[in-house]
Image (cartoon, rainbow, N blue to C red):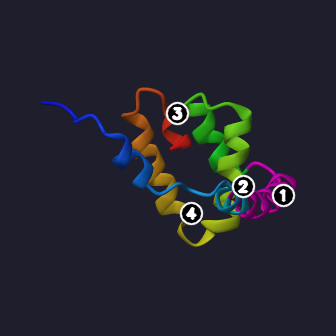
Amino acid sequence: MGRKKKTQDETVAEPVKEPETATKRGRERDDTSSSPEPDRESKHHDIDPDIQQLAYTYKIDAALTQKLNDIMIEKRMNTWEQDLERLYEILKDAHTPAAMLNL
C-alpha cells in the first residue's frame, strides 16, 4: 500500500527540467498578458441603465458593475437582451451574485 521508495539509481535517471525554458515561457506569458491589460482598463464606458438596474437589484459593487458593463458593450451588443435575461435567471438563485459574476 502506498508508494515504493526510490533507489538512488531511479532518482538519478529522472529527467530534470531546465530553468531557462521555464523562465522563457514565463516571460512570454508576461509579455502577452501584461500588454492588453492597460488597454482594457482605459476603455470605460458609461454605465448602461440596464446594467445599473441589474447591479442595484443584486447589490453588485461599482467596480464589478463597470467591468460587466464594459464587457457587455464591447463584446455582447448583438445578444444584449438575451444575456441580461439569462443573467437575471442565474443571479436570482445565486447565494452571492457578485461572486457568480466573477466566474
Q: Position of residue 98 (x, y in %)?
A: 55, 33
Q: Position of residue 9 (x, y in %)?
A: 36, 48
Q: Position of residue 53 (x, y in %)?
A: 62, 40
Q: Please give the range of residues in magenta.
A: 26-47
Kindly identify the amino acid type of the residue bearing the numbered disc 1.
Answer: Lys
Kindly identify the amino acid type of the residue bearing the numbered disc 3.
Answer: Ala
Kindly identify the amino acid type of the residue bearing the numbered disc 2.
Answer: Asp
Q: Residues under labels 1 and 3: Cα distance? A: 23 Å
Kindly identify the amino acid type of the residue bearing the numbered disc 4.
Answer: Trp
Local secondary structure at mark 4: helix
For mark 1, does the 10 Å Cα neighbourhood hold few (<14), some (14 to 19), or many (20 or more) residues? few
The residue to which callout 4 is attached is 80
Magenta region includes residue 30: yes
Circle nearer the viewer, 4 or 3: 3
Q: Earlier in the sequence, mark 4 or mark 1?
A: 1
Q: Is residue 96 left or right of residue 65?
A: left
* Mark 2 and mark 1 residues within 8 Å of each other at the beta carbon: yes
> In the rendering, which numbered label is found on residue 99?
3
Q: Residues under labels 4 and 1: Cα distance? A: 19 Å
Which residue is most to the bottom? 78
Q: State the quadrant of the N terminus.
A: top left
> In the rendering, which numbered label is found on residue 9?
none
Which residue is pictured at 50% across the width and 58% down the height?
Answer: 83
**Up/down of 93 relative to 70, above or below:** above
The residue to which callout 1 is attached is 43
